[in-house]
Image (cartoon, grey):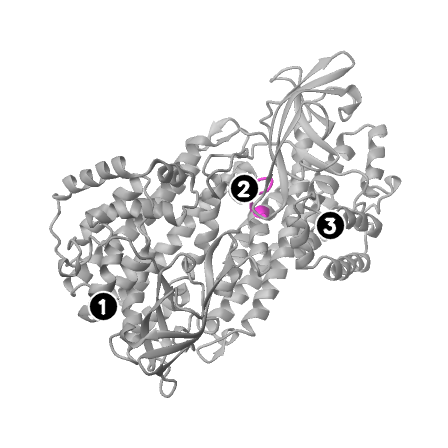
């Protein structure tokens, strides 16, 4: 039961104030404005902000010091993300800091660490994730993209899908099949691919949000130097699972949940029914309270998970991450559902032009309506990406309950 | 006695299914919805609906209609949901026609014939920026001026208001405390500002601002200045059940599409349809759809029978259907995985239509509150 003894950390107040001040000073006004409206940022807008964060080392603050991080405790990492959210700053893009980086510093060579980690720390390189394939979704280990050794290179052929931001990425961390003999989990290797290599084609996928965020990536005789292999050939599944656990913890973004719930409170104050603010309605107040219980639960699960991670040497387990991801993403969808319920009163409009800066058309409803509808639609995928809820339940059934 | 026999209803249902399956393909839907220069719906399709007798299915025979009831209207709306029709059916043949029928003078009833023939399209502009779903909150005012009225006020975003022939506008007579009347206002009247915007499901519409809009006395539906709030509520109930019928059509279609997809997609060496947990989910989608269908049918029947409990039957149906639509739409995407998140598949479009059905003319929570006030 309630065994874990964690010291109450009061040292973070100064740090929080420092982050707040920094955001106040350094967050570019255009980025702040777009964030408030829920508009899409361009890569150069992200860069303008993230590079500033990078000068403080804060993007990778939670990495161990020996790998260029600041060795933040879980509590400090949470505090940092909370303050970013409250300041209206965009959440840190996860592919380098949560995914590629930890795999490289845990399993990579000294040379690889020197080559790739600084780009993440300074936000000079953008990463994308080459995991899913058309035939390998829930069943990720069924992946078929092939890498055949040819002298000092692997020659890669195949296709990845649902690749977020591949059109911006400089590098991809990619699961490839180097052996299709034995069990499907064996014979998978983890390689780093320069997105500028000849033979790579990135094709956009338009999502139900009507936006371009996802891509298909095709490999046609793409030559990848053998030194871009992480760890051992054929052991990629081990590294892949390590990364997935990190990814799933990262899927639960407390600052986004708080931001969505704040939006609900604001919508309720701003929206009237029969001339009276919805915020006066006890049923709506009850609904906000229910979401607060959900948020407290997810935060508690998160704190526990992070504390356990710290005790066990830095890496979350697949099992621990599964429960957190399951409940965190369900809560996210539930809060967005409530936002949509309020917005129904404005006709459920979705003015996609308003997702981009520079559009001066007439908006209907609260100023961030389009951004909230976008989030609602996009987060339908929260229970799919990073391993569907069904997969998370299988992991718990097998791992925790021994079924 | 029902206006249509079971056989006639079956024929109506089949004619919708056969013709729309042929003509109203997903490609056609996308082309209409995304045309830069169009209204966002099909004028030619509208003419076809008139020819098929669908627009007049529930209008009196004296107006060239088929004399059907709410149930027949429900069959047409279910077809609209099944094929994601973009045309202004709700505003024209449900809400607009109902307003003319219930509130109009004999002279105004002639317009019903135009509706049946496809010559008159309408949008029902009742809700206002501060009304939410409340039906009695009207701040738009129509002041007597010479032999006509001058209307001022704002109406919330209404589907198809950007392109229909006329708006049915509710307004208080004389002042903000006067009785509520309904006016038939040509969309192109001077003083009307249409703020066009698409809804989430791709259907277009507009929020409406009326500033000094001058209409003749004959634009007011009916004679006399009696307050029409009760009539408006009846009209909105009829609209609510039509939206439920639309949702049932969409739920049935997307459930079948999901069943078919799971029978073709393989993971872990077997078809997804062979996983028991997914089978049960499909069963839940199917039973959920069936629950909504049964309850909507019961409410339609109650309306046709002039059952005094009909109003509550509609509310119950709207509550249940809203819950069902959310579950079925959400699971359709979930079970399609990443594919369900793409614009390329029809699944996401059903999801969006179901979101609209859940909230149009009041969401489940709102009706639950109305019902609670009467049953506790």
- Residue A378 at x, y percent in the picture: 46, 53
Separation of marks 3 and 1 at Cα, in angstroms: 70 Å
Asked whether, in this view, residue A307 is left or right of residue B266, the answer is left
- Residue A140 at x, y percent in the picture: 40, 73
Instruction: Name the element at disc 2.
Output: loop
Per the rendered image, the range of residues in magenta is: B356-363
Asked whether, in this view, residue B304 is left or right of residue B195, the answer is right
Comparing marks 2 and 3, which lies closer to the viewer? 2
Q: Residue at x 81, y 45 (%)?
A: B56
- Residue B149 at x, y percent in the picture: 73, 17
Q: Are marks 2 and 1 on the same chain?
A: yes
Separation of marks 2 and 1 at Cα, in angstroms: 45 Å
Q: What's the mark number on residue B33?
A: none
Mark 1 sits on what residue?
Answer: A112
Mark 2 sits on what residue?
Answer: A351
Check the image and report above or below for A328 versus B62.
below
Comparing marks 2 and 1, which lies closer to the viewer? 1
Tell me if I can see residue A114 in this picture.
Answer: yes
Mark 3 sits on what residue?
Answer: B71
Label 2 crowd bin: few (<14), some (14–19), many (20+), radius 10 Å = many
Q: Residue at x 34, y 55 (%)?
A: A328
Label 2: chain?
A
Can residue B362 be found in the magenta stretch?
A: yes
Can residue A389 be found in the magenta stretch?
A: no
Instruction: Name the element at disc 1.
Output: helix
N-terminal of the two: label 2 or label 1? Answer: 1
């Amino acid at each position: 039961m309630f065994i874990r003894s964690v010291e109450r950390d009061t040292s973070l107040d100064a740090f929080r104030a420092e982050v707040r001040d920094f955001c106040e000073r350094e967050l570019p006004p255009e980025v702040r404005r777009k964030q408030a409206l829920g508009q899409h940022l361009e890569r150069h807008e992200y860069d303008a902000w993230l590079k500033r964060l990078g000068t403080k080392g804060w993007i990778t603050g939670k990495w161990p010091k020996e790998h260029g991080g600041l060795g933040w405790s879980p509590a400090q990492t949470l505090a940092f993300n909370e303050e970013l959210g409250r300041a209206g700053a965009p959440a840190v893009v996860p592919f380098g800091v949560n995914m590629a980086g930890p795999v490289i510093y845990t399993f990579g060579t000294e040379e690889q660490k020197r080559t790739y980690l600084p780009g993440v720390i300074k936000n000079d390189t953008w990463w994308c994730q080459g995991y899913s394939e058309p035939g390998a979704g829930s069943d990720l280990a069924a992946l078929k993209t092939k890498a055949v050794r040819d002298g000092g290179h692997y020659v890669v052929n195949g296709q990845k899908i649902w690749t977020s931001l591949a059109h911006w990425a400089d590098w991809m961390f990619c699961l490839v099949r180097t052996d299709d003999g034995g069990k499907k989990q064996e014979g998978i290797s983890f390689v780093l691919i320069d997105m500028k290599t000849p033979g790579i084609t990135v094709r956009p996928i338009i999502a139900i949000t009507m936006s371009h965020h996802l891509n298909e990536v095709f490999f046609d005789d793409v030559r990848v130097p053998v030194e871009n292999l992480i760890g051992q050939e054929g052991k990629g599944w081990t590294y892949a699972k390590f990364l997935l656990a990190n990814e799933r913890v990262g899927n639960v973004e407390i600052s986004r949940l708080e931001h969505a719930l704040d939006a609900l409170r604001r919508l309720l104050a701003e929206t009237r029914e029969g001339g009276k603010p919805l915020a006066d309605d006890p049923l709506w107040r009850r609904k906000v309270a229910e979401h607060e219980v959900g948020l407290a639960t997810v935060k508690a699960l998160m704190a526990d998970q992070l504390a356990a991670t710290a005790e066990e040497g830095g890496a979350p387990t697949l099992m621990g991450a599964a429960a957190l991801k399951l409940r965190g993403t369900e809560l996210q969808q539930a809060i967005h559902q409530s936002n949509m319920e309020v917005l129904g009163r404005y006709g459920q409009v979705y003015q996609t032009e308003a997702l981009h800066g520079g559009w001066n058309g007439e908006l209907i409803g609260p100023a961030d309506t389009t951004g909230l509808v976008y989030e609602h639609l996009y987060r339908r995928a929260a229970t799919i990406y990073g391993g569907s809820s069904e997969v998370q339940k299988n992991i718990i059934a097998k791992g925790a309950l021994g079924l | 006695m029902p206006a249509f026999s079971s056989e006639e209803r079956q024929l109506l249902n089949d004619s919708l299914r056969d013709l729309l399956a042929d003509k109203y393909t997903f490609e056609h839907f996308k082309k209409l919805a995304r045309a830069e220069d169009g209204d966002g719906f099909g004028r030619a399709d509208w003419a076809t609906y008139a020819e098929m007798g669908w627009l007049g299915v529930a209008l009196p025979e004296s107006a060239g209609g088929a004399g059907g009831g709410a149930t027949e209207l429900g069959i047409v709306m279910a077809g609209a949901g099944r094929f994601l029709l973009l045309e202004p059916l709700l505003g024209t043949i449900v809400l607009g026609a109902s307003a003319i029928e219930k509130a109009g003078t004999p002279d105004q009833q002639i317009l019903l014939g135009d509706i049946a023939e496809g010559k008159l399209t309408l949008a029902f502009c009742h809700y206002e920026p501060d009304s939410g779903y409340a039906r009695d909150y009207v701040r738009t005012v129509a002041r007597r001026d010479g032999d006509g009225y001058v209307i001022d006020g704002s109406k919330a975003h209404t589907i198809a208001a950007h392109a229909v022939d006329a708006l049915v506008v509710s307004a208080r007579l004389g002042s903000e405390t006067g009785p509520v009347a309904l006016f038939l206002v040509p969309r192109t009247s001077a003083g009307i500002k249409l703020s066009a915007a698409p809804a989430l499901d791709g259907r277009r519409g507009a929020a409406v601002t009326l500033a000094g809009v001058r209409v003749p006395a004959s634009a007011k539906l009916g004679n006399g200045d009696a307050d029409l709030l009760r009539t408006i509520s009846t009209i909105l109930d009829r609209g609510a059940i039509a939206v439920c019928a639309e949702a049932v059509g969409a739920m049935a279609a997307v459930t079948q599409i999901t069943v078919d997809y799971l029978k073709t997609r393989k993971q872990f060496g077997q078809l997804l349809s062979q996983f028991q947990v997914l089978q049960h989910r499909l069963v839940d989608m199917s039973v959920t759809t069936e629950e909504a269908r049964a309850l909507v049918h019961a409410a339609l029947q109650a309306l046709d029978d002039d059952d005094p409990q009909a109003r509550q039957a509609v509310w119950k149906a709207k509550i249940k259907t809203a819950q069902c639509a959310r579950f079925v739409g959400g699971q359709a995407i979930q079970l399609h995985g990443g594919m369900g998140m793409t614009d390329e598949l029809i699944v996401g479009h059903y999801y969006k239509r179901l979101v609209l059905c859940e909230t149009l003319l009041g969401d489940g929570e709102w009706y639950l509150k109305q019902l609670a006030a009467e049953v506790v």
